[in-house]
Each structure stands twice: as structure tokens, then as C-alpha cells.
Image (cartoon, rainbow, N blue to C red):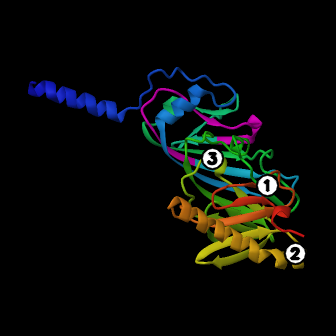
Amino acid sequence: MSKSAALLLFSLLLTSCAEPDLAGIARVAVVPGVTRELAEYRAAVLSDIHYELEFTIPASKGDVIDGEVRVTFTRAASDEALQLDFRENPNNIHSVRVNDIDIEPRIENEHVVLPADVLSDGVNEVAISFVAGDSSLNRNPDYLYTLFVPDRARTAFPLFDQPDLKATFSLALSLPDDWTAMSNAPMAKITPLPTGSKIQFETSDLISSYLFSFVAGKFDRIERDVGGRQMTMLHRETDAEKVARNVDDIFSLHAAALDWLEAYTKIDYPFQKFGFALIPAFQYGGMEHIGAIQYRADSLFLD
């Protein structure tokens, strides 16, 4: 093989490794939901996804929850528009900024459509101001909790809502007086506000969007170290005797379950924190959000 032919072959190999394989993926139509074509296209071109999220939660359940999301991601070379998922009233999107360029929001068939000409090959940043949808926030007068399984994160905020597009999340919640919160990652800091506080969480582990979660409200917080494991429980039970009767067993059973799973799988618990919230009238027995499990309260607080 000549030197020039070898160089040409090497160049072709490098190109094939650097570019995603988009063969067989048609132009992606903007239609409701996440079609296979959209999911395959986004999986082929997107990586390194991170969300910075902030929600301002008012004291009154009747007032809207304002939100800001800043999503950064790496996009492979493509001339295709990019779709974020948002299954809510299009008027809930207030502004869209892509790579420091303000653009007119284009909301179509449950998607925020980002034109290709404002996107870069490589790292991109998209900032969106919005009003959060209520349908998956489970709002009550004194508390709320998210439940995004299987594909309902898109009803609360704009994102790439498909499970193979795992991402990290940095969450901040501005809360009314006497509210606390739990999310997938540990609390980083609490800042006093004139009418409450702002809780900033650390960056989460790499997770699917349906496992991103937070609980906020007037909860009592109990923290325990059980066999070297730091655990946090939120609850709203007002019967002090019931709490005292159950709390030790609740923590010890969680610790025993983790010990058993680690011994059986030979895998250490892989996440930053372990916490759980006991929620009145929760729809299921429990939901395994990473670091922030949700349970129906009467499944653990036994009479």
C-alpha cells in the first residue's frame, strides 16, 4: 500500500469514528410524543447532557410555579432541528435562548423546536423560562411531589424525555416558610429568602429523566446513621406515638435491605445518598427514585 493510500484510509477511519451513524434515520417529523425516529436520532447525536433547574414554588396551591432550565449538551454534526419535549400549554414557554442568542419560541406538537442554524457542532447551551405544568407535580396545600414515570417529566419542564438519554441534574427550589425538600442529590446549601428559603442541591448522579424527582413541603425530617449509612426520612405523621413505634424499624429494615443487596450482587450502593419520603395517599406502594424513594405513608407507619 502506498503512503498516500494509507493516509487516506487512516483519515476515513478517523472520520467514521468521529461521526454518528445516521444511516437509516429519516428526517425527524415534529409530531406528538417521542417517535422511534426522534429517539434514535437524539440518541445518535446527543451526549453529555446536564440540566440546571430552578423552580419557584408559591405558598398558595392556586398560584403558578415558575421555572428556569438551562440544558447543556454535546451535539454531533447535523443539519437537523432539535426537539425538546414539553407536553403543556405552549403559552407556558416564556423565552428561549440558544448559545446566547434569543430566539422566538417555536412550540409545536408537544416540542420546543430549536432551529439547526443556532446550534453548534459540539457543546450547546439552551436556556428556557417557563411555567411548570401541574399534572405530574401532585400539588397539595402544604406539599408537593413529582412522579415522572414513565414519560411525564415533559409535562413539568422542557427536556429530552427518553430513558436512554441519561443526564445529570442540578436543582434549586425556592420554597415558602416552613417548607423543606428532598431530591436525588444531597443538599448543598440553604439561603434565606424574604418569604422562605432557597435550597440548592448538589449535582445528581447520571440518571434517566423518569427517575429525577423532588419532594417539597411541610415535612418533619429525621436523619439517622445506621451501620455507617446516613439516611434521611421525610414524613407528615402527626401521631407522635405512631412515629416512635415505627421509626427504628423503618430505618433498620432499609439498612438490612441494602446490606443484603450488596452482599448478593457484590456491588456497593452506587449513589450519593439514600433518602425516602412518606407521602399521604401516594398513588403506589412506592417509587424507586434514586436517592429519594417515595412511599405511601401508611405502608410504613403501621397502626
Residue that label 1 marks: 285
Residue 261 shown in magenta: no
The numbered mark at residue 209 is: 3
* Pointer 2 or 1: first along the chain: 2
**Percent x, y for residue 35?**
62, 27
Amino acid type, residue under disc 2 in the picture: Lys
In which quadrant of the rendered view does residue 297 lie? bottom right
Give the residue at x 51% y 30%: 116
Give the residue at x 58% y 77%: 228
Give the residue at x 73% y 45%: 156
**Percent x, y for residue 96?**
62, 41
Amino acid type, residue under disc 1 in the picture: Gly
Residue 225 vs residue 92: left or right? left
Residue that label 2 marks: 242
- The N terminus lies in which quarter of the figure? top left
**Local secondary structure at mark 1:** loop
**Local secondary structure at mark 3:** helix
Total marks placed: 3
Cα separation, mark 3 vs mark 2, equals 35 Å
Residue 291 vs residue 250: left or right? left
* Pointer 1 or 3: first along the chain: 3
Give the residue at x 47% y 33%: 44
Cα separation, mark 2 vs mark 1, equals 19 Å
Q: What stretch is highlighted in magenta?
A: 71-95
Location of residue 16 with respect to 212 vertically, above or below: above
* Pointer 3 or 2: first along the chain: 3
Residue 192 vs residue 166: left or right? right
